[in-house]
Amino acid sequence: MGKATIDYSLYLVTGREFLPPGKDYYESLEESLQGGVTVVQVREKNIDTGKFIEIARRTKEITDKYGVPLLINDRIDVHLAVGSHGIHIGQTDMPLPLARTLLGPDAIIGLSVSTPSEAQLAVQQGADYVGIGPVWATGSKDVSAKVKLAPEGVGRVLEILAGTGVEAVAIGGIHLPNLAQLLHGSISPTSRNHLSGIATISDIVGSPTPKDAAAALRAVVDSFKRARKSLGNPSSVFSLSSPEEPRSAESLIRQVGVLMEVVRKHTPLVHQITNNVVINDSANATLAVGASPIMATNARDVADLSKVIGALLINFGTITDKEGMLVAGRQANVNRKPLVFDPVAVGATAYRREASRELLSHWQPTVIKGNAAEIGALAESNEVLSRGVDSVGSGFTDPAKVVKALAQKRAAVVVLTGVEDYISDGEIVLKASNGHELLGNITGSGCMTGTLVATFCAAARLHYLASKEPFEDLSQLVQGDMLVGALAGVLVMTVAAEVAAARGDVKGPGTFRSALLDELYNLRPEVLAQRANVTVVQV
Ligand SMILES: Cc1ncc(COP(=O)(O)OP(=O)(O)O)c(N)n1
Ligand SMILES: Cc1nc(C(=O)O)sc1CCOP(=O)(O)O
């Protein structure tokens, strides 16, 4: 019959024990197929062989009706008994080469993998696809002893599979709210390989309306795959940042001016979970440029807020509200609001590194902003060390390369602040050379830059929504050109600082601090355009 061609987009693993009370397994299965499940695996852990065969046989009648391939978990005998399309096996099940010998070349054989070396072996041994997991904790299987890969870990495995023809689904704790984060955050850093789909038990089986649950997941996966396919440059992070105009420095600066007007006209609400050293200055900077700050931190508060905000800033200078950060970030992803992450002093302590890892595995940032030490820590580079919240030394040998690589690795816009600021969306790199040394003499200037980046990312989203038909790419985490939003935040801060420092009444840090607030308030797009010193860096 030849090997089946499988669309792995939405892979249902069955789990009768997770059905809602009163819901019939076959009814649920059929509804999930109507919702768009593309492949089914029958997984039964505690039943007799006869019963397993009976369930698999009836399942196959239904999957056949919808033209959807059927696989069997672990059991070659059951596969042979019902004539399914193949099997899925784990690392401790029958070795793959033996399974291949028994089943022949036409059977689909999928293998569970958790590491790049397991993936390498799967390729060598002729797996048709791999199931990468667990991505997150799950109540559907005991994975307590296993490392939770998070999207980044899935990306490391995908790197190995690039160009091999072996497709991959991710599994474990995947639900609608974290799906877009997983799809984008797992794109492999170098090869830009991406998942062929996702596998789930509880998100579909546990739903009283499996058709709707499957349709919602499928729409996001389809959107993601369509966007990746149509992407001119596969290294781009935001497929919908496709610019209306070519990305010259001049056109980007012009778009920054537009966003300055958008902020003043629409006063976006900028939610900030920031450190207690800078709360007041950050709130005032937000107000000065025409937006509205809200500094809520409580986990119960932040979940509701998410629907009404324009953007979220998470700055973990004094990590006192990690729960709030986790919830607010996840909600920002769910509601597709820009999320700016400022990992203050992330390289300075083990606790901060762990906190950053935890946050980044829980949600997907839109923009990551940091100084050289912070960006170095996230990029796992030893070039720059940190002393508290400051960087030691002058920075990277090739900062443009570092920001571009990190943007691709994290599927986010990256802003590296310093004497010169570098900004990349993984496709192009901008160097902005404005600012004044007095910025280094007041506390919180870096944090305020993060605030303004969030503010103008909110404006970029509003601008996009006002100028286009409703967004069609359901997999995209945010709408609008976040590169321009990030550039706007950096330029408004640094140009206002230049104007403030040049004033006759500025004598030092104290007067500079007040003048900076005034000049943020007074800054107009024409002045910014005259002063902005931006170049596109070739990397
Ligand atoms: C698609 C997919 N991926 C991974 C698994 C896990 O399989 P395995 O490691 O064999 O563990 P059990 O399912 O047997 O508990 C899977 N079933 N499907
Ligand atoms: C069957 C299975 N295998 C996993 C692995 O990591 O190999 S995680 C998992 C359970 C997936 O269920 P849910 O979608 O409800 O989280």
Image (cartoon, rainbow, N blue to C red):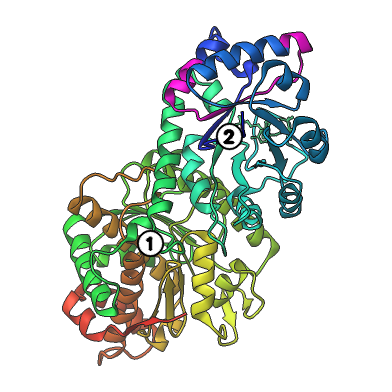
Q: Which span is picked out in magenta?
A: 30-51
Q: In the rendered structure, which amino acid carries the disc numbered 2?
A: Ala
User: Against 312, is 251 above or below?
Assistant: below
- Residue 217, which numbered label? none
Q: Give the SS element for disc 2.
A: strand
Q: Is residue 41 left or right of residue 308?
A: right
The N terminus is located in which quarter?
Answer: top right
Residue 104 drawn at (x, y percent):
74, 33
Image region (quadrant) for ligand 1 = top right
* Residue wearing tag 1: 232
Q: In the rendered structure, which amino acid carries the disc numbered 1?
A: Gly
The residue closer to the viewer here, 209 or 308, is 209
User: Against 155, is 91 above or below?
Assistant: above
Identity of the residue furthest to the front in this view: 1
- Residue drawn at x 23%, y 79% is 528
Q: Give the SS element for disc 1.
A: loop
Residue 203 drawn at (x, y percent):
53, 28
- Residue drawn at x 61%, y 74% is 388
Earlier residue among tags 1 and 2:
2
The residue closer to the viewer here, 19 or 111, is 111
Residue 21 drawn at (x, y percent):
56, 10
